[in-house]
Image (cartoon, grey):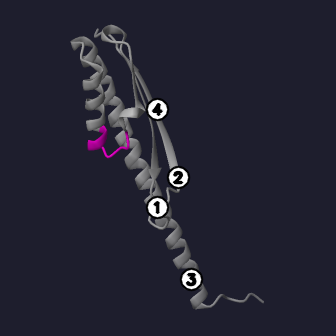
Amino acid sequence: MDKKPSPQARRLVLLFWVLVVAFYFYLSTDYIRVSMADRDLGEYLRYVVNVSARDERPNKDIRSLITMKAQELDLPVHEEDITILGSAEKLTVAVNYTVNIDIPVFSEGFYTKNFSHHVSYREPR
């Protein structure tokens, strides 16, 4: 004596699963976008550290280059998130920041991801 669910109940269940799939799709696309931007920032950091160490650029220039690239990639990196130690061949740059993964239903950040980069000068081979 199996009782079949009504067509309205089936539609309601289908709507629920469509909303769940849309939620996870939006969450994953925003996460992937942020992760790819972070990877690009990490590559740029290695480039900036090597060029800045070789040219002995001041810390202010290095910090401004990094913040401009972060703005270009739409990442929330501020000057206080950047730590620069040493100079020339002993140059080390650390960047630590947190990104809120946005979801349209919630006004506050639903999920946050911490990113950390530590890059030191390496002599070209």
Give how far across and how far down residue 74 sits, in percent.
Answer: 32, 46
Q: Nearer the viewer, mark 3 or mark 1?
A: 1
Residue that carries the numbered disc 3 in the rendered image: 12
Q: Could you tell me the amino acid type at mark 2?
A: Tyr
Residue that carries the numbered disc 1 in the rendered image: 103
Q: Earlier in the sequence, mark 4 or mark 2?
A: 2
Per the model, the C-alpha gap separating discs 4 and 3 is: 43 Å
Question: Circle 4 — which element?
Answer: strand
Q: Earlier in the sequence, mark 1 or mark 2?
A: 1
Q: Earlier in the sequence, mark 4 or mark 1?
A: 1
Q: Main secondary structure of the magenta part?
A: loop
Residue that carries the numbered disc 2 in the rendered image: 111
Position of the C terminus, as image quadrant, is: top left
Q: Nearer the viewer, mark 4 or mark 3?
A: 4
Residue in the image at 33% along x and 34% along y = 41
Per the model, the C-alpha gap separating discs 3 and 2 is: 28 Å
Give how far across and how far down residue 68 sits, in percent.
Answer: 26, 37
Question: Circle 3 — which element?
Answer: helix
Q: Could you tell me the amino acid type at mark 4?
A: Ser
Give how far across and how far down residue 85 sits, in percent.
Answer: 40, 17
* Count of numbered labels shown in the rendering: 4
Per the model, the C-alpha gap separating discs 1 and 2 is: 9 Å
- State if disc 2 and disc 1 touch (CB < 8 Å): yes
Per the model, the C-alpha gap separating discs 4 and 2 is: 17 Å
Residue that carries the numbered disc 4 in the rendered image: 116
Q: Could you tell me the amino acid type at mark 1?
A: Ile
Question: Residue 79: which quarter of the image?
Answer: top left
Residue in the image at 37% along x and 13% along y = 86
- State if disc 1 and disc 3 touch (CB < 8 Å): no
Span shown in magenta: 70-77
Question: Is 73 in front, or is 83?
Answer: 83
